[in-house]
């Protein structure tokens, strides 16, 4: 009798400890999942919590019982004890990730049928209002269903999920399906494509957070390199949705009479725009 009572007490304590641990788990802000139940039985899930923790689980759908609706999926990820630690983002990586999640827009497009019996991968970003209510933004679906959210923030988040959780099956870009940020020439992206570059001068100003703008002298080689980059380079994707007040260099392009024709602003090699920062290639300045 005593052994039975003791065992029951231990079980209650363990259940209480588990409930406390799950309640304290940071909220999920990004996840990707693949389910195959047609020609197999498989589930693969990777997720990121708001503290930068990476989590993963793989197994059989008959065992894991992965829900279908995103509301239930978020509840599942918050409550399950099946997740295994898969790493941790750095402070800077998490900050950039959260900036993209804060800025991502939902798509009005609906998934369409695509493949047959391939299973379905779906990826979502999750935001919370002041009351803690979740909002899930669909970033993309591949496999039996197909959808790409073409918002640059969504494309960047979808790509990051592929790098963070490569074990999650994804069909993006397969079967001639184009996917991801379409490269755009720097000149077109920055509205500089109508400039005649034959006789353009370049000046540079560095913006210090405290001292303000300071002109920077450029050598002829530096002028040539920045012009070559702008004339031949491409914008290839978004890195973050940051806004900065310093640490940037702005390059102004002017004609022989000193008339300003346009400019670009850079921060550590990234193109600074009103909605965040973008990667450039090739870029050697």
Image: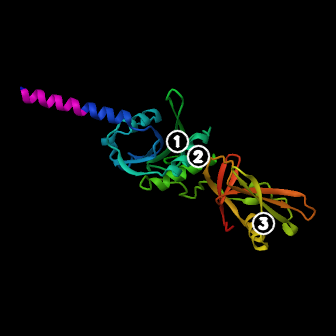
For the N terminus, give its image quadrant.
top left
Segment colored magenta: 2-14
Q: Which mark is residue 217?
A: 3
Q: Is residue 41 visible?
A: no
Examine the structure image and report whether residue 180 is included in the region drawn in magenta: no
- Residue topped by disc 2: 154
- Structural crowding at the residue carrying mark 1, measured as other residues with C-alpha within 10 Å and reported as few (<14), some (14–19) or many (≥20): many
Residue at 71 percent of width and 64 percent of height: 233
Foreground of the two, 158 or 220:
220
Going by the image, does 117 lie left or right of 84?
right
Q: Residue furthest bottom?
A: 221
Q: Earlier in the sequence, mark 2 or mark 1?
A: 1
Q: Which mark is residue 125?
A: 1
Residue 62 occupies quadrant: top left
Q: Earlier in the sequence, mark 1 or mark 3?
A: 1
Q: Name the dominant secondary structure of the magenta segment.
A: helix
Residue at 90 percent of width and 61 percent of height: 258
**Would you say the residues marked 1 and 3 are in contact, meaning their CB atoms lie under 8 Å apart?**
no
Percent from the top left, x then y, of residue 140? 54, 46
| Cα distance in 3D space between marks 1 and 3 | 44 Å
Foreground of the two, 184 or 9:
9
| Cα distance in 3D space between marks 3 and 2 | 38 Å
Disc 1 versus disc 3: nearer the observer: 3
Foreground of the two, 118 or 227:
227
């Amino acid at each position: 009798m005593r052994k039975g009572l003791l065992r029951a007490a231990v079980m209650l304590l363990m259940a209480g400890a588990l409930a406390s641990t799950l309640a304290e788990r940071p909220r999920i802000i990004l996840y990707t999942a693949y389910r195959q139940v047609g020609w197999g039985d498989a589930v693969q899930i990777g997720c990121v919590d708001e503290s930068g923790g990476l989590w993963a689980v793989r197994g059989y759908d008959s065992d894991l019982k992965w829900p279908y609706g995103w509301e239930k999926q978020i509840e599942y990820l918050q409550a399950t004890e099946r997740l295994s630690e898969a790493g941790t983002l750095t402070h800077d990586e998490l900050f950039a990730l959260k900036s993209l999640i804060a800025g991502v827009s939902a798509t009005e497009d609906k998934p369409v049928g695509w493949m047959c019996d391939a299973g379905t991968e779906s990826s979502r970003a999750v935001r919370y209002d002041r009351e803690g209510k979740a909002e899930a933004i669909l970033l993309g679906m591949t496999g039996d269903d197909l959808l790409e959210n073409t918002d640059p923030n969504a494309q960047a988040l979808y790509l990051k999920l592929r790098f963070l959780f490569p074990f999650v099956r994804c069909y993006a870009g397969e079967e001639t399906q184009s996917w991801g940020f379409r490269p755009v020439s720097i000149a077109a992206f920055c509205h500089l494509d109508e400039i005649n570059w034959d006789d353009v001068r370049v000046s540079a100003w560095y913006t210090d957070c405290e001292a303000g703008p300071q002109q920077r002298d450029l050598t002829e080689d530096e002028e040539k390199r920045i012009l070559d980059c702008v004339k031949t380079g491409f914008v290839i994707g978004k890195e973050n949705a940051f806004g900065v007040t310093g640490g940037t260099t702005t390059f102004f392009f002017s004609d022989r009479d000193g008339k300003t024709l346009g400019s670009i602003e850079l921060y550590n090699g990234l193109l600074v725009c009103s909605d965040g920062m973008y990667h450039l290639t090739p870029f050697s300045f």
